[in-house]
Structures are given as C-alpha cells and as structure tokens.
Image (cartoon, rainbow, N blue to C red):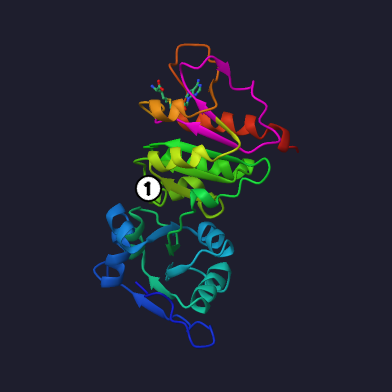
C-alpha cells in the first residue's frame, strides 16, 4: 500500500504512480485485503470504500486517500479516470487490477470497479459543534454494522451534528458499515468514547440529554427539542441502555407501540427520534 504521500519543501505533494497488479498474492494487494479485519484497520488506521460514488464522496469531503484500486476494464476516459487523476495528484498510487484481484479485495463475486483505501478519522466528543440547536445521537454499545450504517445515513439526512459511539462498539469503518452509510460516513462526524468519558462530558453539557427506554413513561413527542442542543441516547440492541447512562439522562422517552413486537429495531427507533427532534428544522 502506498506510504503517506511525500511532501516537498514548499508543501506540494509528490504525485503518486499508476501500477498494474495481476496477482492476489501481490504484497500490496495482501495488505489491502487485510483491511477486511478490524485488527488491521486499527493497526494501519486505514479502511476501504467501495464504488465510484463512495470514493468521490470521500474525496469531495476532503478525506485522505492512500491507494485507489481500479478495474483494468474501467473506462478511464470518464469519471473513473478523473478520480484516478485526483488520486495521483494527491500523492497516492493507483492500482490497475483484474477482476480476480478486485473480487479478493472486496470479497464479492461482482466487485465494484473502484475501491479506495482511505485514512480513518474520528471526531472528538468535546469538539462536536452542536451550535445553538444541533442534534447529536449517542449509541450505547451498538453491535450491528448494518444498524450503525443506517443510523449514520439517517443522521446525515436530518442534518445531525454527529454520532457518538459509547463503550464497546462495532467498527464504523468496517466494509459493511461503510457500505450501509451510502457515503454518509464521510459527512457525519463520528466520535468514540468510553462510558466514563461520555458521563464526564455529559456533566458539562448544557442542552437536553434525552434517553430512550422501554420502561419510560414519557412519549417521545412530548419534549420541546427545538431551540436548544440535544443529545439523543439510544440503547444497545439486546440490553438497552446501561443503568448509569439511563440515570444520566434529563428525560427518558418511549415510542408508543401497538401489536406484539417487544421493541423497534435500533436503527428504526433512532430514525424516529432524529426526525422528531429535528421536526421544526426540516421543511420541504
Ligand atoms: N430488550 C431491549 C430493552 O429492553 O431495552 C430492547 C432494545 S431495542 C431493540 C434497542 C434500542 O432501541 C432501545 O434501547 C431503545 O434505545 C430503542 N428503542 C426500540 N424501541 C423503542 C421504543 N418503543 N421506545 C423507545 N426506544 C426504543
């Protein structure tokens, strides 16, 4: 995989190179394939974004690319060629790969013809900009990559200021989560904190901390969300919120249900909460 882009004295970046790779056992390809594992993403600080749309979203949002893999069969006169040119200009290498290599990297039979290797980026909880009336969603020990991806996409759609991952959590940069975000991973700040760090931050937070709980007695439509910063706190898929997190909330809310389902899926409940908290700010 390309090293960090080399910078010249005057701040310009040495252009990357275009190389052809044909074998799945090529060492660069092996490193990229390794990014399917969290351990390797943690060690390298890198992750994969598949598909032209996602790679363009990442570049447009200023994320740093380290390697671009494109299909040898891709039409380089169009957008793919322009993305490759942007990659080389950013000092990263472009690998032209055959289908077998792309299948191995993406672990799919019908791989996308563009895959980007990007540097991971986390926001700091203390620096999230809530503004006067921004909404942030905090997730207690979220386990399911699809849920997290869907929540990031929904948070983006409502204009939320960030997503906070509290405690032991699924990796927001896993291939499955990145895919499910449909590119929103690149526009929603994501912070990751321990439960203790969240509770410390909460002590100094002047807005409303609204938790969701299956035993709550207040309707989720009751609070006045508008006009103040809001942190929505959502529970783990199996266990709900820990007692410490629930106790730290200004209010605990429930979404009324009819029928026999015990609860809603976490991503669905989060979507309802986000749209309710942002109701006054969202107009057609
Ligand atoms: N067995 C868990 C419990 O009793 O808390 C159910 C967890 S539920 C699948 C995951 C999370 O989604 C909950 O912790 C809560 O944040 C949210 N949730 C799901 N349905 C909800 C509802 N009807 N009202 C409020 N929150 C809900």
Main SS, magenta residues: loop
Residue linked to disc 1: 171
Q: Residue extending furthest bottom?
A: 9
Q: Give the range drawn in magenta.
A: 210-236
Residue at 49% of width from left, 52% of height from top?
A: 124
Residue 135's spot in the image, x, y percent? 60, 39
Residue 281's spot in the image, x, y percent? 72, 37
Q: Quadrant of ligand 1?
A: top left
Is the residue indicated by label 1 positioned so its CB lies within 8 Å of ligand 1? Answer: no
Say how many tags the image has: 1
Residue at 50% of width from left, 38% of height from top?
A: 202
Residue at 37% of width from left, 74% of height from top?
A: 2
Query: Relative to residue 10, is residue 250 depicted above or below?
Result: above
- Left or right: residue 153 versus residue 277 is left
Other residues around mark 1 within 10 Å, as few (<14) / some (14–19) / many (≥20): many
Residue 172's spot in the image, x, y percent? 42, 48
């Amino acid at each position: 995989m390309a090293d960090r882009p080399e910078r010249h004295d005057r701040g310009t970046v040495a252009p990357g190179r275009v190389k052809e790779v044909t074998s799945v056992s090529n060492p660069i390809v092996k490193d990229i394939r390794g990014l399917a594992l969290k351990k390797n993403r943690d060690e390298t600080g890198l992750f994969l974004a598949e598909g032209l749309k996602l790679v363009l979203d990442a570049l447009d949002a200023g994320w740093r690319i380290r390697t671009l893999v494109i299909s040898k069969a891709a039409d380089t006169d169009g957008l793919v060629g322009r993305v490759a040119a942007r990659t080389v200009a950013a000092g990263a290498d472009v690998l032209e790969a055959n289908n077998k290599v792309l299948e191995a990297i993406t672990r799919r039979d019908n791989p996308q013809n563009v895959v980007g290797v990007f540097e991971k980026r986390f926001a700091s909880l203390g620096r999230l900009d809530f503004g006067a009336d921004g909404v942030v969603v905090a997730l207690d020990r979220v386990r399911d990559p699809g849920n997290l991806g869907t929540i990031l996409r929904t948070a983006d759609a409502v204009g939320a200021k960030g997503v906070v991952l509290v405690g032991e959590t699924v990796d927001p940069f896993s291939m499955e989560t990145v895919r499910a975000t449909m590119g929103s991973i690149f526009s929603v700040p994501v912070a990751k904190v321990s439960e203790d760090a969240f509770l410390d931050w909460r002590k100094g937070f002047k807005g409303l901390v609204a938790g969701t709980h299956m035993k709550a007695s207040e309707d989720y439509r009751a609070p006045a969300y508008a006009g103040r910063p809001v942190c929505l706190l959502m529970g783990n898929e199996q266990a709900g919120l820990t007692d410490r997190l629930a106790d730290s909330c200004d209010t605990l809310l429930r979404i009324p249900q009819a029928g026999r389902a015990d609860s809603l899926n976490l991503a669905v409940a989060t979507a309802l909460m986000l749209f309710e908290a942002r109701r006054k700010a969202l107009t057609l």
